[in-house]
Amino acid sequence: MALFTDVEIITLQDLLPYESSLLQVASSHSINAVQKIALAKRAVGENLMLFLQDAGVSDPQWLSRPTIGLSTVVVTPPLKRWLCFDALSGFFAEAYNVQLNTRFEAKWKEYEREVKHAADQTLHAGLGIVFKPLPKPHMPEVSLQQGSTPAEALYVQVSWLDLDGNESALSPVNGLVANNQSSITVQMAEGALQAPPAALGWNVYVGSNTDSITLQNGNPLSIGSTWTLPASGIVNGPRGGEGQLPVFIIPISRQIRRG
């Protein structure tokens, strides 16, 4: 699962199953749906920080920080719904204010109720926490070089690994079209200096399309190293996971705090 501070923990694609006409409404009413997602993340994050401060749980990775931070919070399914519904509530609130359309008002109120329900579910279940967070990596750096593989499109993702074999969420996809008799090299955009403290190594995933991206390395790649596509080409390895699972649940009050 993604961590709360990862980039793009929810996107427009996550909202479309709830509102298939979202993009059309956004275009016709000049509403920035991506901004609504950012505002929802900020609002939910402020609530979560209040809960974490009240819980008073110490953070073992930062001795100078007295409490657990958002970088250790796992985005569980109820928390993801909370974020989606908060974004949709803000979206239709603006749509109603633009046009005073009763249909938009009804959707706004509906999603306000869904926000409360999803928040209650999240708080009832407790917040999932990891003590050694592995943030989602930036888009990897991919470059062409001479090789022996045929011309084809290649799509690449990477992930961080820790000593216990835990893996971060996969990075955004980077891709290019390899020329005939060429190869590619891949490296983490963060390099060695910006690797997360908990990271022991990294994985590389490659595919000829975005639906076939699979693990290419048998053992973890060392921090700061570069991976090169071998002459034998892409291997059909395992698919990537969704990120870290919680190792601890913080039970918190179900009363939503308003900051």
Image (cartoon, grey):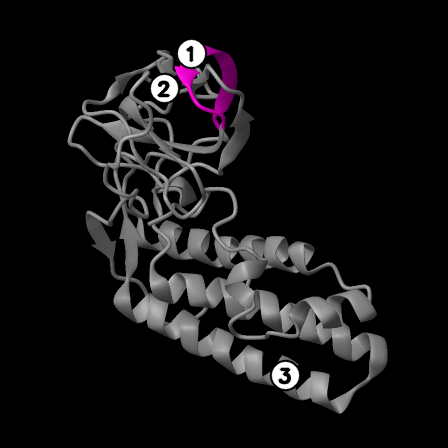
Q: Which mark is residue 97?
A: none
**Element type at mark 1:** strand
Name the side, left or right, on which 145 lies relative to 100. Answer: left
Q: Are marks 1 and 2 in contact (CB under 8 Å)?
A: yes
Q: Tell me residue 98's x, y (percent).
A: 83, 75
Q: Is residue 166 above or below residue 210?
A: above
The residue range painted magenta reads 140-151
Residue 257 shows in this picture: no
**Element type at mark 2:** loop
Within-10-Å neighbours for mark 2: few <14, some 14–19, many 20+: many
Read off the residue under disc 1.
147
* Numbered circles on residues, count: 3
Which residue: 50% across, 21% down?
141
Which residue: 28% across, 48% down?
129
**Element type at mark 3:** helix
Q: Tell me residue 127's x, y (percent).
A: 31, 57
Comparing 184 with 15, the one in front is 184
Q: Amino acid at mark 3?
A: Lys
Q: Residue furthest top?
A: 146
Q: Tell me residue 201's x, y (percent).
A: 27, 21
Q: CA distance from mark 3 to mark 2?
A: 50 Å
Q: Which mark is residue 229?
A: 2
Q: Quadrant of residue 88?
A: bottom right
Read off the residue under disc 3.
107
Q: Is residue 100 above or below residue 244?
A: below
Q: Are marks 3 and 2 in contact (CB under 8 Å)?
A: no
